[in-house]
Image (tube, helix red, strand yellow):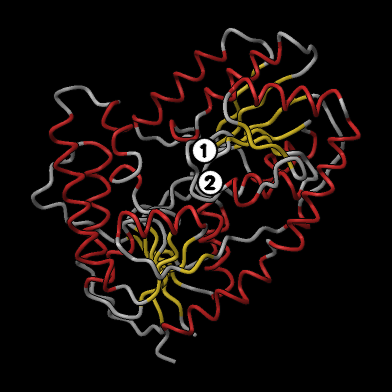
Amino acid sequence: MKVLIAQANLTLKGGAEKVVLKIAQHYRAKIITAEYDPEGTFPEYGKLDVEVIGGNSTGFPAYGRVFQGLKYGLGFYNMNVDEDYDVINAHIAPSHWIRNRNERVLWYCHTPLRDAYDMYRFRMSMKKFYQKPVHYLGIKAVRRMDRKVVNRIERIVANSQNTKGRIEKYLGRNDARVLGGGIDYKLYRNRGDEHYFLYPSRISPNKNQEFAIRAFEEFSKKAKGYRLVLMGAVSKDAFYQDYYKRITEMAKGSKNISIMANVGEDEFRDAYSGATAVLYPPINEDYGLVPLEAMASSKPVIALNQGGPRETVIDGKTGYLVEDEHSMCNAMLKVSKDPELAAMIGRNGRKRVIENYSWEHFFREFDKELKSVSKL
């Protein structure tokens, strides 16, 4: 089966990029993308066939992130695939717009474009008054293009029930199948408790790093000798750079908070292995590989009780689902004071990952979905 992968961009080391990489490697698939930064994303992409396509932004000013997304999207929307393929596998929005001129598309939806839908008000509130009208026009254009394309996509697979709900609510498709991404659990280990809490995630407002900082600040007033490590990719985009500066300023007041940007996979896995527990407070996360990686490392997960973690973390058994910074602090106190409890939760988590989130299971099911769309 000849698979062609469409991905909006490959510029960071994030969860979606891990999934795309694994699928491309498994099917030896060519990847088409609107932007590729070999230095910014996983180096393994350098061994794959990656083609960068141009976007046609006629009629759209180069103004902000939404219009950058439109430029990406129009490249896919106007593309005629002139090579032989059995199925196109689209990923991050708006790569699914490739369905406009090409058939046999399976969209593995990580999420509909959040700026245009569930995070629209949040993003709009961050804009200066003179930016809001232009941002609004960009959002209207995204929604209009989605309406033209989504109903024509042959098959949609969502990475979580949370994402499936967004697809139904905002895009009007209620037939998406749920299949969460897998994990290479054999690569993760637990070398013990080295007295630090870890939050590994892309540096972004919706990843909510300031939540973890505030929870740790409260924790530090009640327990001494612990650190907080924030670790993740930082986009070169000014929007994300501004946020990175903001959380760096927040962390300056404490010698026990460190931020490690743009590190490699080995460093991530090493950080997991020595953590007391892994914090995970993103805003209504689509799915989230971090809780799975934490559980594979036999570490308790302390996650905000919304979005994808509600599907992967079993409260009280593989970690804790919390409502606010104060309850996150309490969960941190609980696992730090009771090493036996933390170890038991860690064992439960690793068992859950092995039984439910292997790549073998993922590809067994994903292969069926691709074949349901393929011309073979």
Q: Amino acid type of disc 2?
A: Lys
Relative to 284, say whether 161 is above or below: below
- Helix, strand or loop under label 1: loop
In the picture of the structure, the residue carrying the numbered disc 2 is 13
**Badge 2: how crowded within 10 Å, few (<14), some, or many (20+)?**
many
Position in image of residue 122 (x %, y %): 33, 32
**Badge 1: how crowded within 10 Å, few (<14), some, or many (20+)?**
many
In the picture of the structure, the residue carrying the numbered disc 1 is 202
Relative to 196, say whether 315 is above or below: below
Splitting the image into 4 quarters, where does residue 8 fall? bottom left
At a point 55% along the width and 79% down the height, the residue shown is 367
Tell me: 249 left or right of 304.
left
Relative to 371, say whether 292 is above or below: above
Closest to the observer: 28 or 163? 163
Sequence order check, earlier mark of 1 and 2: 2
Position in image of residue 6 (x %, y %): 38, 65
Splitting the image into 4 quarters, where does residue 179 fall? bottom right
Position in image of residue 121 (x %, y %): 29, 34
At a point 47% along the width and 50% down the height, the residue shown is 38
- Helix, strand or loop under label 2: loop
Closest to the observer: 37 or 312? 312
Position in image of residue 71 (x %, y %): 22, 51
Q: Nearer the viewer, mark 1 or mark 2?
A: 1
Closest to the observer: 226 or 112? 112
Q: Residue furthest bottom?
A: 376
Relative to 347, say whether 263 is above or below: above
